[in-house]
Amino acid sequence: MPPASRAPKSGGAALELLVHGVGGATPQDMLDDPRTVRITGDTTAAMHRRVDDADAEDHPERYAERPVPEAYVWSNLTSGNGARALWLLLLPFMVANLAHWMRPPAKGHPRLVRLYGTVVRLVALTLTVLLTAAACEVALDLTAWQCAGSAACAEDRSWLGFLSAERGGWWSQPGRRLALAAVVPAALVGLLWYLSNRTWSAYEAQRPPTGYDENAPEPPAEKAPEPPDRHAKTGDAAPHTTENATAESAPDPPEGPADSAVEVRPALGRPGFWYGRRLVARLRAAHTAAGFLTVAAALTGAAARHDREAQSALLDLLARSLQSAYIVLGAVVLWVVCRRGRSEKRLDLRLERALVSWLPASSLILLALAVLHTGWSRPDWHSAGTLPGNATFGVLTLAQGGLVVALGVVAVLLHRPGGDARTALHGLGGPAVAMLACALGGVMSGGVAQRVADWLDGPATPGMGAGSAIAPPVLLSWQASVIPVLLLMLLGPAAVLAVRTARAARRLGPVVEADYGTEEPDPVRTGRIAAARATASLTDAAPALVGTVSGATLLLGAGSVAGAWASGNVPGRAFGGAHPAIASAAETAQSLGSWMIGFGFLLFVTWGRRAYKDASARRTIGILWDVGTFWPRAAHPFAPPCYAERAVPDLTWRMSSWTRHTGGRLVISGHSQGSVLAAAAVWQLPPATRGRVALLTYGSPLERLYGRWFPAYFGPGPLRALHRTIHCWSNLHRPTDPIGGPVRVPAAGDKPAVDRAALLDPVVYGRTPEHPLPEPVLGHSDYQADPAFAAERSVLLDRLPPTLPRPRDGAADRPTDQGSSGRSSG
C-alpha cells in the first residue's frame, strides 16, 4: 500500500482512505511509518493513522497542503489463527452460496429471478443433507452397525469393545449401538448451527447507514448529507421493513440516462443488501431441522425394517408415526427454504422468532423420539451387511443433478434477452459453480467414508477384499472411481492452455519491445516480460475450464449412479467378468480413486491451514476464498461468514463521518479485493456524500472477475451507474496482473473514462541511471512503485470540489455512534 503523497495546494482538507487487498497488510506498511495508532475499530477490523496525524480532524487547517492518510485493516476478518482452516470444511456450502450471486441480470423477469434463487437454495439444502448423511454413514453404518457387529473388527479395536455384539453387553444390541452413534452426526449439526449463529453475531451484525430513499431525487453534490436515520441505532423497524420487497421479486433497476434527475441505486447500494439477518435466521432454522431429521430418518429406517420383518405391530406403528412426522416437518422445511429470498430494498429488521425457535426444536424432539424408538430392546435383532438406506446417496445425487439442470435452464432464460458477451459461460456460471459445489460435497463426504472404511477393514480397497466385512455404499465407490477418469479428461484442456500460453508469449515479444521503445532488446528480458503477460492472461480462460469441469462432473456423476444401481456392486467387481483389460482398468480406477479421494481431502485441509499461516500461500489461493466470503449468506446459512457485512458498513460510516465533521474531500484507494470493498461502500453512501468522494482502484478484479461472474451486481450497467454518481474514479492496471484489469467503463458526459493507460511492468526495460539494477516484474503487487500512482491520486484530489465551510457547532451533525471525531478512546 502506498504512503500518502502531496496534493495540490488547493481544495482544503482531504482524507486518503487506504484499503488493502488479499493477503492483508500491516498499518505500518500501508502508512509507511513505524508509529501508527488505531483511531477507531477493534482488533478484528480498524482504522489506523500515523501518530502525528491522530488529531487531524480537530485541526484540518494543518492539512491544507496534503491529504490525511488513514488505513483500514480488515485482514483479521478472513485470516488469523490456524483454527480458521476448519472453515475450509464448509467449502461446498460457500461455493453453493456463490452460485446464488452469479445469476444473469434480470430485466423485467421477477418470477425467473425468484425461481433462480429458490433452486439455488434447494441445492444448498441437499448439501446439508449430504453432509449429515455422510456423518451418519461413518458413525452409524461403518462403525456402529458393521464394525461393532463384526467380531474380527471389534476385537482389533478395543475402544469398540463395549459395543461388540460378541460380548453380549447392554450396548451390544444394534438399536442401542445406533442410538449411541447418532450423537456424532447430531453433534455435527448442532455445531454448524452454533457456528452460524456465532459468526453472524461476530461478523455480520453490522447495520449499514439508513435513511436513503432510493426513489427520491438526487440532491446537489454541494448539499451536506442528512444525518443517519435514527432507526439504524434504535432498531425501530417500522419505516424500513416490507414483507414483499425482496431482491428476488424485483428485477434489476434500469441504468437510466446520465443526466437523470432520479438515480436508482444498483443492488449493492440498497439499504438492506449488507444486512441479511432475517433470511440467514430462517435458513439456519431450516437447515438445522433438515440435519436433525436426516439423523432421525436414518435411525428409524433401520429399526422399521426389522420391526416389519419381526411383525412387531406396536413398534411398527410407532415407526410409521415417526416417519409421517418426518414427512410433515420436512415439508415445512422445504416451504421455509422456498418461501422467500433476501430483502434488500429496505433494511429488514424483522425476525420470525417463533419460526427460528420451534423448527429446530421440533426436529430435535423428533430425533430424541427416534433415539428412544431405535434403542428399545430387540433381543432378536442382529446387524448384517450394510445399514438400510444406502439409496439415500443415489437419491441425493440425482436430485442435485436435476436441480443443476433446472438452474441452467433458468439462467439461459435470464441471459438470453440481451446478456453481455463477456459474461462467464454465457450466463451459465451459476449452474456450473453449483455443480462444482455438489461435486465438492460428494468428494468430501465420499473421502471421509472411504478412509474410515479403509481404516476399519485393513489394507484391502473397501469392498474388494476377500470376505470384506466393512464397506461404504456402492455409489461412493463408483464416485471415487471416476476421479482418475476426470483427471485424465482434464489433461487435454491443460495441454491446450499450456501450448496457447507459450505461443502467446512468443507473439508478445515484439509487442513488449515496442511498448518500451528499446533500441537494444534483450531476448531474455523480453521473454520474461512476455511470459508474465501471457501467464496473466490465463485468468481469462477460467470460465472455459470451469465449464469443462462442471460438464464432465455432471456426466460422470450420472454414469456413477447408473453403474451403481445397475450392477449393485463396486466397479472392481462389477467388471470382473469383462475383458481382462477392462476389468483391470476398473479395479485400478477404484483403488486409485479410493486413495485419491481420501488423500485429497487431507491435503486440502493441510493446504488450507498453511494458507492461513503462510502469507505467500495465502496470496496464491486467497483471492478465491475472499471472493467466496465477500458475498452474504443468501443460499446456505452454514457457509463461512461474510466479512463484507462488517467491512462495508465500516467504510461507509467512516466516509460519512469525515465529510460530515470536516466538510472535506475524500479519496478512497482500494487494491485488489480492497477495490471491491471500496466500490461496495461508495454505493452505500448517500448521494451528497458520494459527490465529495473520489475512487482510486488498482489491481482491481471489479470487471475481470466480478463483472464476468456476477453480472447482475458488477456488470456493465452497475459499474456505469457507479461512475455516473461518484464524483470521479480512476483505475490503474497492468498487463502482467493475473487478477486485476480494466473496468471497461467509458466516458460519461464531462467525466473521462475510468481506465488509465495500462502501466508498464516493470517500470523500465533495462538499466538506467535512476534504476541501475534490473526492476522486477511486479504483477499484482506494489502498484505504488509506479510514479503514475501518485500522479493519478493527485489528479483525483484536484478534481474534487473544495472543502465546505466547517460548522461552528459540529456536534449537531456528527454520527452519534462514533463520537465527535470518529476516533476510539481505546
Image (tube, grey):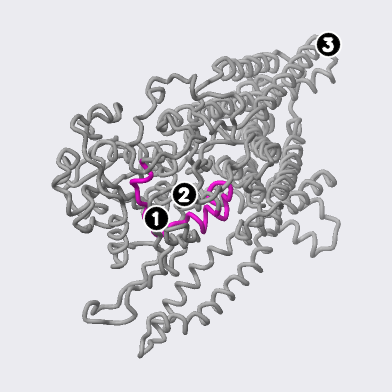
Where in the figure is residue 285, as x and y percent of width and height?
A: 58, 24
Residue drawn at 43 percent across, 63 percent down = 755
Mark number for residue 729?
A: 1
Whether residue 19 sits left or right of residue 293 in the image: it is left
- Which of the pair 805/356 is nearer the observer? 805
Where in the figure is residue 361, as x and y percent of width and height?
A: 59, 16
The residue type indicated by label 2 comes to: Leu
Mark number for residue 47?
A: none
Mark in the foreground, 2 or 3: 2
Whether residue 537 sits left or right of residue 737 in the image: it is right
Examine the structure image and report whether residue 340 is included in the region drawn in magenta: no
Q: Earlier in the sequence, mark 2 or mark 3?
A: 3
Above or below residue 542? Residue 669 is: above
Whether residue 764 sits left or right of residue 241 in the image: it is left
Separation of residues labelled 3 and 1 (CA atoms):
75 Å
Pointer 3 local density, CA inside 10 Å: few below 14, some 14–19, many at least 20: few
- Pointer 1 with pointer 2, Cβ within 8 A: yes
Separation of residues labelled 1 and 2 (CA atoms):
9 Å
The residue type indicated by label 3 comes to: Ala
Examine the structure image and report whether residue 692 is included in the region drawn in magenta: yes
What is the span of residues highlighted in magenta in the rendered image?
689-716
Could you tell me which secondary element the residue under label 3 belongs to? helix
Could you tell me which secondary element the residue under label 2 belongs to? helix
Residue indicated by mark 3: 313
Pointer 1 local density, CA inside 10 Å: few below 14, some 14–19, many at least 20: many
Where in the figure is residue 795, as x and y percent of width and height?
A: 30, 60
- Which of the pair 541/813 is nearer the observer? 813
Residue indicated by mark 2: 722
